[in-house]
Image: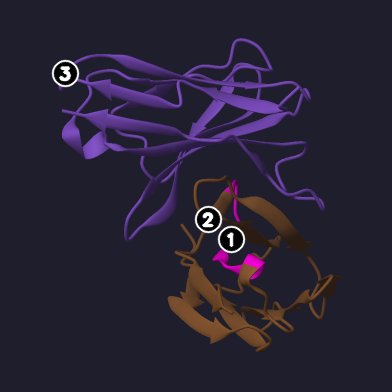
Amino acid sequence: DAGITQSPRYKITETGRQVTLMCHQTWSHSYMFWYRQDLGHGLRLIYYSAAADITDKGEVPDGYVVSRSKTENFPLTLESATRSQTSVYFCASSEVGGRETYGYTFGSGTRLTVV
Amino acid sequence: ILNVEQSPQSLHVQEGDSTNFTCSFPSSNFYALHWYRWETAKSPEALFVMTLNGDEKKKGRISATLNTKEGYSYLYIKGSQPEDSATYLCASLEDALNFGKGTSLLVTP
């Protein structure tokens, strides 16, 4: 009952391949988010979702696709991986999007290397 | 995208020292300001969520203040301990959290 789990923890893929990072939460939180962490940039928002079937772009969405067919899952797909997408990816969830007094809960991260 | 700035970028203190960090954010259209603690090889963990001007929050030796009119928040650690070593992130809320780059704190015995 980890609450929010990401898989895989580590992934190496080749340039041009499609890869999907999984995120699953057990709390039925409405909001889910994908961030990437890069040296010198901190956490940058890729996509977020306010509810099932509702997704919106964040700061750095290019090259990524998300879906949210079920409340508990929010997969992130790199359609054709590039080396610039080598990063650590964090999924997070929040009960009401943070506009109340709730913080985000983060998964353990997926370290993706594109070679 | 709101521009959230944190200073200093890194800090090295001795055990027992008190320290503070600054987070600045655009004050227009303010919704909330979050602080997170991020230990190496772990995930960020929420410390405080602050919404009102003048808010003060405290958790043990860590406290935070918020000034929404001038767009800044301070995080204070009293009597730093080695286990306080971590990166401290602040984030301002738009449609989602926009994070600063963090302040990396190292506390040595």
Q: Which residue bears the numbered disc 2?
A: B98
Dot 2: element: strand
Q: Which residue bears the numbered disc 1?
A: B91
Residue A12 lies in magenta, yes or no?
A: no
**Position in image of residue A109 (x %, y %):** 49, 35
* Segment colored magenta: B83-96
Q: CA distance from mark 2 to mark 1?
A: 5 Å
**Circles 2, 1 touching at the beta carbon (< 8 Å):** yes
Residue at x-position 54% and y-position 25% = A6
Chain that bears disc 1 = B
Chain that bears disc 2 = B
Q: Which mark is residue A3?
A: none
Query: Which chain did the renderer colour brown?
Result: B
Choose the circle earlier in sequence order: 2 or 1. 1
Dot 1: element: strand
Vertical order, A76 against B79 (above or below): above
